[in-house]
Image: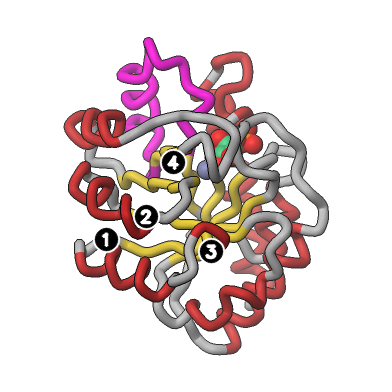
Amino acid sequence: MIKLSPSILASNMLHLENELKIFTKMNVPYIHIDIMDGLFVPNFSFGTAAVQSLRKATDLVLDVHLMVYDPIKNIKIFCESGADIISFHFEATNNPNKAIDYIKRYGKKACITINPSTMEEAVFPYLDRVDQVLVMGVIPGFGGQGLIPSTLKKLSNLRNYIDKNNYNVDIEIDGGILPENVRSVLDAGANVIVGGSSIYKGYRLEENIKVLYDIFREYEKDESGSHL
Ligand code: DX5
Ligand code: ZN
């Protein structure tokens, strides 16, 4: 099943409560929350207070993307703040297994993330232990960038490896996803779609989500047909 994860990095903070209502009404399953430390990426965004407030306000799955160095130090506070999925960057730690152990110790879903410059093979050894792998389609830190074309090959290599080994791992794509290219990332094997600018464009959230849902529906229809 294809899942949409709107990235509130693009949100209007003053209207977040109303945005949450729209996501709930539209049956959006995940909310993508970007955490930046100003070091791993040259920007700042949300912290634990934001995750805590969102946790109080919604039952939707909080998909927390840690763009921070030394994620192991920070996993506990984000788990306790109410995250459901914790994504850490492969590049930000020298001990991915320990990061996965920590996330699981708190009963949360573990996701390993790779930057555009990291080869997908680097995370193959961890795919039997995680719930999700996140592939960055852009250099992390900012919304509104264009999808890097080599991401597609990366997604399909991951999809093949996951399917070949019968792993139950979602593939999330983050960065540069638009209605014009979402089909190509689905074709390549992604099944969790992060949308920042595509969802907030013109601040027409409902309409933009509908556009993406129509594409998902169409894709799933074609997919089920192709197996007949
Ligand atoms: C970028 C963030 C993304 C960002 C995506 O570093 O991780 O979640 O919000 O924004 P778009 O969809 O605009 O590329
Ligand atoms: Zn993100």
CA gap between label 2 and label 1 equals 7 Å
Other-residue count near label 3 (Cα within 10 Å), few / some / many at <14 / 14–19 / ≥20: some
- Residue numbers of the magenta segment: 6-30
Say left or right for 90 vs 63: right
Q: Tell me the amino acid under the disc marked 3.
A: Phe
Which one is earlier in the sequence, the residue at label 2 or at label 1?
A: 2
The reply to whether discs 1 and 3 touch (Cβ–Cβ < 8 Å) is: no
Which one is earlier in the sequence, the residue at label 1 or at label 3?
A: 3
Query: What residue is shown at x 81% (from left), y 58% (from top)?
Result: 150
Whether ligand 1 has any atom under 8 Å from the Cβ at mark 4 is answered as yes
Which one is earlier in the sequence, the residue at label 2 or at label 4?
A: 4
Q: Which residue is mark 1?
A: 108
Residue 90's disc is 3
Question: Ligand 1 quadrant?
Answer: top right
CA gap between label 1 and label 4 equals 15 Å
The reply to whether discs 2 and 1 touch (Cβ–Cβ < 8 Å) is: yes
